Image: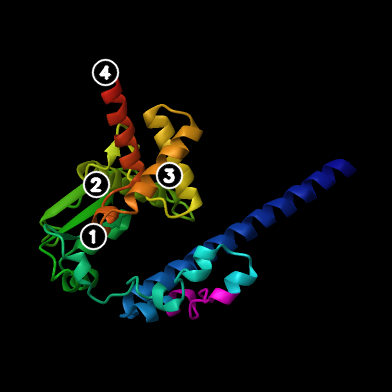
Amino acid sequence: MGNLLTDIIGEWIAGGLREAIMAQIVSLFELINGRVGEVAANVGQTPEAWNRLLGRSPNCITWQPEDYRQMGAGDKIIQNPPKIDASVLKSYLIGCEPSSARTAVRPNAAVAFLVGAEADHLSARSPWFDAFNRVSETYESRAAIVIGSHRPTNSQVAPVENLFFVEVDLPESPLDLSAHLAAKLVLNNVSTASMGKLGRLVGNGMAHVDTTNKKLIDRGVRLVAEIADIDYRDACYSLFESIHEMAAWPEFQRKTTSPVAYTIRRLEETRKASDRK
């Protein structure tokens, strides 16, 4: 009897804890979603957007050469410290201010991305769509990607030149996990297809990888090893040979060429030349 009572009490406590934890998580997500919505609705400029999103000013690193020297950093970093202070952070525009970079490449389009009930925003009478119209005035066209179980009818949709509908059931849950997962998978497909159209795929791999930190260097080496069918050590040497060679290239050429993709192409050309002999 005692064990049964203990088990019942334990189960009751565990259930209460689960409900309390879930309530806290839901409350946290609602707070975050509300904060993001507040930012989107009320913030115009990037500095204000950072402040309102974080609830404070961003805390950025402002280390000077002497700080790096005391930490035992390499001479290269000491002589040219990375610029990662607040002014650099705020140069990446996340506010509602216009940016010529968004329309410099043609053709271009403003794309609305809507999941589930958000598709109602496409109504011509929607305040959201009025706002979308205003921010998309400088673009050549407008499009919408809609994810959900019901395709919006023509009578429901405000004028957009292209409507891409992804039909999928989105079971409701406290954290809307199905909607978040569907959005991620759709955007993954869009980005992968875009890389393919830009010629940045090698076989089935996204080889257009930059080598700006150790994580990306390791990823690049592994891609070279897998696609070129060589071991990790040789792939590492080959990648760094390419990086050294590309350092002498004009800046515009370096910015548009991935060291990883260039290494794979160079190894393939070397192998083909060897086979012809």
Q: Which image quarter: residue 53?
A: bottom left
Please say whether residue 89 is visible from this viewpoint.
Answer: yes
Give the number of the mark in front: 3 or 2: 3
Res 277 label: 4
Give the residue drawn at x 24%, y 64%. 121
Residue count near mark 3 (Cα–Cα under 10 Å), binned few <14, some 14–19, many ≥20: some
Residue placed under numbered mark 1 in the picture: 112
- Looking at the image, which is closer to me, 266 or 61? 266
Give the residue drawn at x 52%, y 73%. 61
Give the number of the mark in front: 4 or 1: 4
- Looking at the image, which is closer to me, 30 or 246? 246
> Amino acid under label 3?
Phe
Would you place residue 35 above or below residue 74 in this image? below
Mark 4 vs 2, N-terminal side = 2
- Measured Cα–Cα span from mark 3 to mark 2: 28 Å
Would you place residue 233 above or below residue 66 in this image? above
> Amino acid under label 1?
Ala
Secondary structure under tag 4 reads loop
Please say whether residue 153 is visible from this viewpoint.
Answer: no
Residue placed under numbered mark 3 in the picture: 240
Give the number of the mark in front: 2 or 1: 2
Residue placed under numbered mark 2 in the picture: 194
Give the residue drawn at x 78%, y 46%. 8
- Residue range of the region highlighted in magenta in the rendering: 51-66
